[in-house]
Amino acid sequence: MQNTKGEWQKVITRLHNRKNFANYDLATQAIRKLGYPDFYKNATIVDAYSGAGVFSAALHNELNPSTHIILEPLKGYYKFLKILERPNVFVEDLDPFRWGSFGTLREQGKLAPEEQPYSQVHNKLLFVANLSHPQGEQLTAQYLNCISNRSWLEKYGRVRLLLWMRAKVAEKLVANAGELGRHRMAVQRDSCCDVRVVFHEPFSSKANSGAQGYPALLKTPLCEYDYKRDVKAQSHSPLSLIELTPKEQEVENLDEFEYVNKMLFISRSTPLRASLNTLGPGGSDDLAEPLKDLLDKVPTDLTIPELERIVKAFVNWPFRPDFLHNFYEEALMGRGSNEDKHF
């Protein structure tokens, strides 16, 4: 795919909210290091917000998929994407932000995933998305909900997600217990996904100074890249490529786990002996005994097994709240919408 600097600049100036990875050779190297050419044989690639299509072209050429669906609602990119069209490559103007877009593909017969058991990672379906735009963090959270609930594409098995995102979002997503930037999103990811960092350039100045506690996974990406050379964007904002692989085991008491995670992280730097009250009136008194060895810990330092202990105590608490979710938030985050259920 040959594009002149002038052609790139015209597109990027108009579509400045999206960042495009533009190094084909480095993209190929990353895909090989991930082991995808050996793992995905005659697979379907769903490729969302493909932009100018450099990474899409590398994926296609390395994986030789049976079907490659490119979803790009911004027509400014079509000059580049049309180069990729083949009998098995569909360039669609559907917006991946809308769940109904995937139902449309299913109705058209372009997307017909096979179901695979959760004992293995799905080897016939791969989802890729460029979430470097402002709505990317919200979509990342929605995708995590789908993995946790085994809905959307995840109803067909353990479908990997390969996501471009702003480095600031990656730092929220990847941080393990006790590391800088641990948010409720990281806890949810930790509970339902294994993660690999393919590309990363630190967003935080603390990372550049080597501050203790910066997420270890972000310090050792599979590949190194040069932002000025390899990324086309109107302004400099670090970019990451993160692979999410759903875990085989589901989280027990999922509704309660999500509630506990959400409420404790309202005050994520407050020790548990005080923050247990966020779970319900009297929580700090009633739940203290079974959790007494955790009371001095703050939510950001809690591991998944420790959170599961809190959830178990909460489930057995006779005075726990009856209503655990804000249903408006559930709809916003993609849990159980009609479009999702019928896909």
Image (cartoon, grey):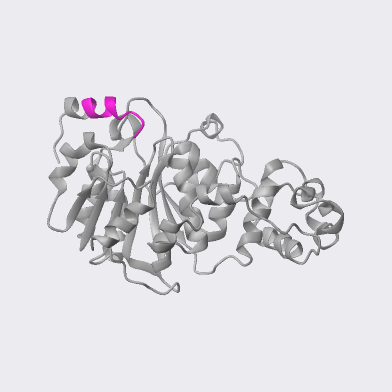
| Highlighted magenta segment, given as a residue range | 9-18
**Total marks placed:** 0
Residue 16 in the image: above or below residue 100: above
Q: Residue at x 66, y 62 (%)?
A: 305
* Quadrant of the rendered image containing residue 115: bottom left
Q: Residue at x 81, y 46 (%)?
A: 274
**Left or right of residue 208, residue 80 in this image:** left
Residue 283 in the image: above or below residue 166: below
Question: Could you tell me if residue 307 is visible in this image?
Answer: yes
- Prevalent SS, magenta region: helix
- Based on the picture, tell me whether residue 239 belongs to the magenta stretch: no
- Based on the picture, tell me whether residue 11 belongs to the magenta stretch: yes
Q: Give x and y (percent) for residue 243.
A: 41, 53
Q: Give x and y (percent) for residue 325.
A: 63, 53
Q: Residue at x 41, y 75 (%)?
A: 117
Residue 41 in the image: above or below residue 180: below
Q: Give x and y (percent) for residue 318.
A: 81, 64
Decide which of 7, 338 is in the foreground and name it. Answer: 338
